Image (cartoon, grey):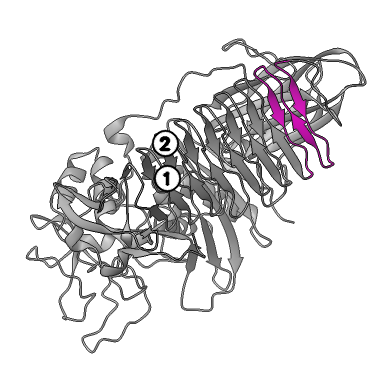
Amino acid sequence: MTLPTEAVTLAGSGLTFINYYEDGVTPAYRAAAIAAENFLQSQFTNQLTVSVDFQFSSLGQADSAENNFSEVNLSYQTLVSELRSHATTANDDIAVNGLPASDPSGGVGFDIPQAQAVMLGLKAQGNAIDDVVTLNSDLNWTFGQDAIGAIDHELTEGVFGRISSLGVAETRWNTLDLFRFTASGVRDYTGGSDGVTTFFGLDSNDVSNLAFHNSVSTTGQFDGQDLGDWDHTVGDSFGPGGPGSPGTVSATDLQVLDILGWNPTNSSGPFTPAPDDYASSLTDTSAPMGHLAIGGSISAALQEAGDHDWFAVQLQAGDTYTINEIGATGHGGTLADPFLELHDASGNVVASNDDITDGTDPDSRIVYTATQSSTYYVDAGAFVDGYAGSYTVSIAQTGGQVTPPGAGMVLTGTGGDDSLVGGAGNDTITAGSGHNVLRGGQGDDIITGSSGFSDMNGNMGDDTIHGGSGSNWVVGGQGDDSLVGGGGFQDIVLGNLGNDTLHAGTEANVLRGGQGDDVIVGGPGNDYISGDLGNDTETGGTGAELFHGSQNIGEDLITNFDYAKGDRVELDPGTQFTLSQVGANTVVEMTGGGGEMILQNVTLSNLPSDWIFEGTLSHL
């Protein structure tokens, strides 16, 4: 029998684990996993959620356990900057201040686990599996400290970033590569090929007596074992272990995790969530009950894993309502995986939903026909109570073909192909699941797409437009608009007139500011970003961004150009320009037009020749 998925929390820590258990994982294995996680939670306070898939499979006789995880690549400059900004202890300060001035990877870059990237603020909290941990079923585990130590060994690699590559185990380097020293305090990046033992150290003056495993022989052969593990250190979780060899985490081990950016409990004190904003149940009097109006929405937050927010709403018997809890995917907040319930007047659950679309859209939606005219309660939570974060909850009476009789209307499409047009007031327009044409009127409108194709235009006014999980055309029209792409591939987000704010969706988007002084922010996909006319501020996301410029642009500021992750600058064919270094910035000045692109904190001499190029008319 497969054990149920669950969230593992510990008072005083913001670190939450969501555990998935595959067939073969026994209650004893589960208990060891939770004990291992509770130990790590007791030592660190960072607020994030880590999803772990536990397996029990044959690995032969070579390895006691293994883990597999996704990584995020970044430049040395970015890594050092984030480690510096997350330095909270004296050891952190020593470690960061002692880092080499130049990139020891030679520009190859660094990989860190995606959970560590979330902790450092380099990646948004998601709901995908962060680490797959497998214990070897060929071995005779007691599922006491032997399994606990082995699980902590794997979690500190695939979650915390206790991994080492030196460009040998994989193409890119890892953070721990920066802290390998000889006994005399000299940094050693050879992995053993020089025949010299290397030790963990904060800097050249603070070298421990724990030796790393040197995986490379003096003849250059790589043995395939982990460069980040201790060598010949039995009884330590970061060294060799397995059944009959229980491992514990030492003070030096915790020091390793500290300098990787994690926040130790003994330096910061226990994690304390922000005050709760809404009641967590029908009987909770410690926070106010929320109140939703039909056609309205509220932005709120789950302050910690396990939090719920309740909202009272009046429903009429026979009427059908659509209730949404929109988090990170639909750009309603930061909540990675909402879970929505509807309760009747007595608090009984009458409807619930985890995902709008299983596997692709983890936001939540309930469509419910009221059986009685009464007070109901919308319960906004998270999947298995495992996430914290902000969200937007809304409710609308479902309509079919909607014709607005007046201003300030709430318009909601059906599952068909709808055309919804607002009036002169501040309208709220929500697409159904079909192919939709959504048009705002003269007011400040809120327009939201859905799982189908949505063609959205705010027209006049300062509008807020969110793309849905389908493909989207998001156009601001006149006014100073706020525009967000959705989950579709190649969403088009166009500010048009006014000083607009544009955010990419989850896939590769085309983002164009139009006229005015716009703010454009990329997302996780490989986005095309063009400020067009006006003085624009452009910030790339985690993908490889293509920043577009032309002869007629204003003064465009690119805040985080990163060649190592694939960012490039593309100019219109025939654009004449000059390049220069002005202070800390690289400047592309358009000849004759007066426009320029400023790459903030980028050194021109460090950029390879292909960082800027002229595109083709067919592409543009």
Q: Which mark is on residue 178?
A: none
Please state, as top left, top right, bottom left or bottom right, where the N terminus lies in the image.
bottom right
Q: Is residue 35 above or below residue 318?
A: below
Question: In what element is the residue under mark 1?
Answer: loop
By secondary structure, the bulk of the magenta-drawn segment is best described as loop
Direction bottom: furthest residue: 219
Residue 284, x across and y down, in percent: 63, 14
Direction front: furthest residue: 592
Answer with mark 2 or mark 1, whichever residue precedes in sequence: 2
Magenta stretch in the rendered image:
407-434
How many C-alpha atoms fall within 10 Å of the one at disc 2: few (<14), some, or many (≥20)?
many
- Membership of 450 in magenta stretch: no
Residue 293, x across and y down, in percent: 72, 14
How many C-alpha atoms fall within 10 Å of the one at disc 1: few (<14), some, or many (≥20)?
many
Question: In what element is the residue under mark 2?
Answer: loop
Q: Is residue 610 above or below residue 430?
A: below
Under mark 1, the amino acid is Asp
Q: Nearer the viewer, residue 319 or 309?
A: 319
Image quarter of residue 109: bottom left
Residue 555, x across and y down, in percent: 30, 42
Q: Is residue 161 left or right of residue 138?
A: left
Residue drawn at (62%, 48%), measured in percent from left and top? 487
How many numbered badges does the structure rendering display? 2
Q: In the rendered image, is residue 315 in sight?
A: yes
Q: Which mark is on residue 518?
A: 2
Mark 1 = which residue?
532
Labelled pair 2, 1 in contact (Cβ < 8 Å): yes
Residue drawn at (20%, 81%), measured in percent from left and top? 193
Q: In the rendered image, is residue 209 in sight?
A: no
Q: Is residue 321 above or below residue 123?
A: above
